[in-house]
Image: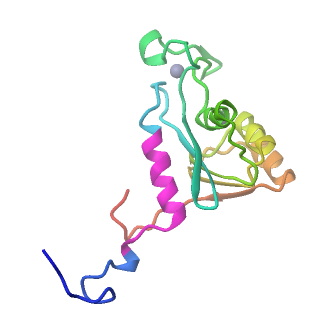
Amino acid sequence: MQSDEPINGPIAINGAARPGWDEYFMEIARTVATRATCPRASVGAVLTRERRILTTGYNGAPRGVAHCTDAGCIIVDGHCLRATHAEANAIVQGALHGVSLEGATAYCTHQPCSGCSKLLISAGVVRIVYRDAYPDPVASMLLREANVAVEQFVPDPLRTLT
Ligand SMILES: [Zn+2]
Ligand SMILES: [Zn+2]
């Protein structure tokens, strides 16, 4: 159907309906999380810089190692040690493909643990946006000391995305 409506006319895309950048990348992180192979959690991370995606990661076993879904988790002290965390996998993807993460923003479906926080700091990430709170006092302390901005993403209740 052809339309002669001006671009700012009644059929123009409603600006209020478009997601902001944080929401956009967080939705992508949530999609990435659906690829997780550890049944204990579906976690996703998207590393960006200047509104471009650098790398993505989800929690799962290392390359060449059986997935938790096939071989079972290796649980030690309540944590699965078979799977690599999503944030760590996103950083590893940068190492594998030669993508610098200096100055990046990390969008994480869950608040990063202390181990991943250390990797994010050293990889050069300057801002972390997470959705689900998973408080880790050591992570918070280290991130604060390293001057990494940490923000919880709060979805707009007026939008249909959940
Ligand atoms: Zn597992
Ligand atoms: Zn972690």
What count of labels does the image hold?
Answer: 0
User: Is residue 108 visible from the viewing direction of this image?
Assistant: yes
Q: Residue at x 37, y 71 (%)?
A: 158
Q: Position of residue 71 (x, y in %)?
A: 46, 10
Q: Which residues are magenta?
A: 17-32
**Vertical placement of 21 versus 130: above or below?**
below
Image quarter in which the N terminus is found:
bottom left
Q: Left or right: 127 with respect to 24?
A: right
Whether residue 69 sits left or right of residue 103 in the image: it is left
Above or below, 74 against 141 in this view is above
Was residue 18 drawn as part of the magenta stretch in this picture?
yes
Task: Report the residue at 55% width, 12% height from top.
Answer: 65
Rendered location of residue 83, percent (x, y): 57, 22
Q: Nearer the viewer, residue 97 or 88?
A: 97
Of all residues, the one furthest to the right in this rendering is: 145
Vertical placement of residue 136 versus 17, above or below: above
Magenta-drawn stretch contains 76? no
Please name the residue shown 71% across and 42% down the image.
136
Identity of the residue furthest to the left in this view: 1
Question: Where does the image place residue 156, in percent across and percent down from the top left?
Answer: 44, 67
**At 30% from the left edge and 82% from the top edge, which residue is drawn?**
12
Magenta stretch secondary structure, dominant: helix
Along the line of sight, which residue is nearer the eye, 154 or 21?
21
Instruction: Name the outermost residue toward the top.
Output: 71
Q: Is residue 154 visible?
A: no
Q: Quadrant of residue 15?
A: bottom left
Q: Position of residue 2 (x, y in %)?
A: 15, 78
